[in-house]
Amino acid sequence: MTQNSNLFISIGKQIKDEYGRTIGKATSFAVNPNGRINSIYIEQGNGKIVKCPAENLKVEDSEIILLSRVKMEATTLSDQIPLIWRKDQALNELLEKKKISPEVHEDLHKSFEGVLNQLKSEAKTLMENVDKETARCTKEIKELNYALVNLEIEHEIGEIDEQSYQTSFATIQECIKKTNTEKSELEAMKSKLSNILLGETPPLIEQETREEPTEESKAQEQAQTDALTSSTPSSNLPEPPVVVYVKEVGESSA
């Protein structure tokens, strides 16, 4: 993240994750001699103090947000892999246009290929971590649903008063919502990385995006066909109406 002097006045303030869950409070920083913050020390709810990279922090209004390292790495890889691919493709085009020599092409191609393989290896490892995080979310959601059911049971038999029930119910529901959001984002992240590793590079993805409205185009074509055929009573047109309609037009113009 971009260094922000607001971090220095965040001591003692609560730090939350991207989903609004409290991580702990800022207690200290690790600072370079030139004044650049490297890390932040966060006191968690259990009293333990953990050290997190400053690059994972974002200052938003008066809040300090700790960004997910998995998401940050996924974003970086999702940008870098297609970029190297495009550079390698551009290199091939330069060779075809005879703007560079085969020797230069070979050297640079090997360089790009090496970097690309390294990034893909990192992406595969990251996807395994994403799977673990997704499994964690699934487990948490299951446990929270059990907590909700048990809360309902105890409230039903009169062991929990209405006010306590309403407060706890809202808390659990909000937690389930946030965890579901996190899980969905993790799944989308893995899907994007998987598509990139399968070779769906930006040019292909853009092409797919352009072709996406295929069904819509078909619907429009069908609507146009219906509009054309609606002027002639359907009882006079044998199946299929479109074919017969075209034949009739041909005959009338002959």
Image (cartoon, grey):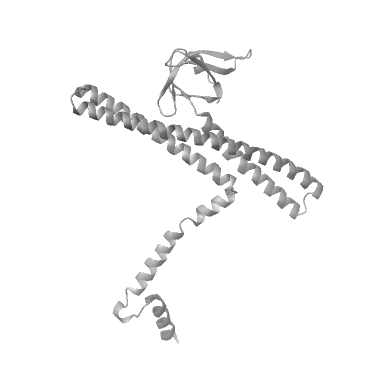
Q: Position of residue 29 (x, y in %)?
A: 54, 14
In the picture provided, is 157 more to the left or to the right than 6?
A: left
In the picture provided, is 247 more to the left or to the right than 90?
A: left
In the image, residue 4 above or below residue 96: above
Can you see residue 96? yes
In the picture provided, is 18 more to the left or to the right than 77?
A: left
- Position of the N terminus, as image quadrant, is top right
| Residue 172 figure quarter | top left
| Residue 140 figure quarter | top left
The residue lying toward the viewer, choosing from 208 and 59, is 208
| Residue 166 figure quarter | top left
Can you see residue 62? no
Q: Position of residue 24 (x, y in %)?
A: 44, 18
The residue lying toward the viewer, choosing from 8 and 12, is 12
- Identify the residue at image location x=37%, y=76%: 241
Q: Position of residue 201 (x, y in %)?
A: 59, 48
In the picture provided, is 60 more to the left or to the right than 92?
A: left
- Position of the C terminus, as image quadrant, is bottom left
- Identify the residue at image location x=56%, y=18%: 39
Q: Position of residue 150 (x, y in %)?
A: 27, 28
- Identify the residue at image location x=33%, y=30%: 174
- Identify the residue at image location x=51%, y=35%: 130
Tell which residue pokes out farthest to the left in this image: 158
In the image, residue 28 above or below residue 247: above
